[in-house]
Image: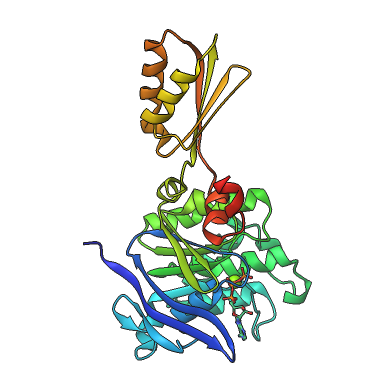
Amino acid sequence: MRKVAVSIRGFVKRFGSVVAVDGLNLDIFDGEIFGFLGPNGSGKSTTLLTIATVYKPSKGDVEVYGFSVTREGDAVRKLVGIAFQEPKALWVDNPYELLVWHAMVVGYSLTDARKVVREVMEELGLWEHRNKLFSELSGGTRKKVEIAKLFIQKPKLAIFDEPTAQLDVTTKHFVWGKIRDMNKEGSTIIVATNDMVEAERLSDRVGIIYRGTLRALGSPSELKDMIPGGDIIEIRVEGFINESILRKLGDILEARRLDLSNGVLKVYVNKGEERIATALDILTRENIKVRSVAMKEPSLDDVFFYFTGAKLEEVRG
Ligand SMILES: Nc1ncnc2c1ncn2[C@@H]1O[C@H](COP(=O)(O)OP(=O)(O)OP(=O)(O)O)[C@@H](O)[C@H]1O
Ligand SMILES: [Mg+2]
């Protein structure tokens, strides 16, 4: 059994009449990078803020390494660090002071705090902005300061709420690398994101949340396999394929759909990678010359739309 880092049980969060999270059950394992994916307003930030003890559950409970966020907040706060979706500067005027203060709060001596803050600020291209006022920083730069907090803190459980939403491409790749490094060094990671590329590049497992409930859970490739007929095997052939061969292919491969046009046969199947060999075998026996084969997987975008309903009809079509 894998060790559980975060256990969410029957978690409900209401704000007045708004139900932000509606009975969430979810385990996040020690040592994994967990991607929390969902459209705007689906309850991602509310859940993350509850794990970090900012909010209290209206119902149910959340445990972090066995400590309850409702009853043992202090113990939870020792284990968790969060980079907020909307960075707030609090009362400190400039990024350098803020990060040195944060480093000392999480246990560094003043000398070590200054050292680690400089290192991380240089890495993120923040050093030149160290003495600016927060109000003078661009949105992306403010976000980098927010993320820097966790790279300094290296908490047991690091929560990033849409870490790269405002970052340029180069910084985005750098931040992904740093998050992976943190994970290798022992931090369990939760990343909330709307960005499929980010979810796929980073996550061991992804949870799709929609309207406050969990719609799907699994590794990116498991989720793709949950879409019926989600893989497309594309076979370029020479010559003619008659109806009976097409029917045979469809039956044996359990295809949901088969299209042949301009010498390209498209077979819509589940677990396409396991069926390519069979497809080629059948065609060879029927003396049909295959010129090339390719397999297309659905993107995580397709999965996301499938489970959140937005493109259900197209996927089914
Ligand atoms: N402090 C609050 N007071 C009232 N309603 C809130 C509050 N925080 C969140 N909500 C509502 O709860 C729901 C979930 O919001 P939440 O911020 O958790 O979504 P999200 O998945 O993080 O969205 P986004 O992708 O836009 O960040 C929304 O309907 C939101 O308006
Ligand atoms: Mg959010």
Q: Is residue 52 visible?
A: no
Q: Nearer the viewer, residue 253 or 24?
A: 253
View quadrant of ligand 1: bottom right
Q: Quadrant of the C terminus?
A: top right
The residue at 65%/79% (across/down) is: 88
Q: Position of residue 22 (x, y in %)?
A: 48, 79
Figure check: 150 above or below 227: below
Q: Quadrant of the N terminus?
A: bottom left
Figure check: 183 above or below 251: below
Residue extending farthest to the right is 136
Q: Nearer the viewer, residue 172 or 279?
A: 279
Q: Nearer the viewer, residue 49 or 96?
A: 49
Figure check: 73 above or below 79: below
Horizontally, residue 29 falls left or right of residue 50, namely left
Q: Position of residue 117 (x, y in %)?
A: 55, 67
State the count of labels.
0
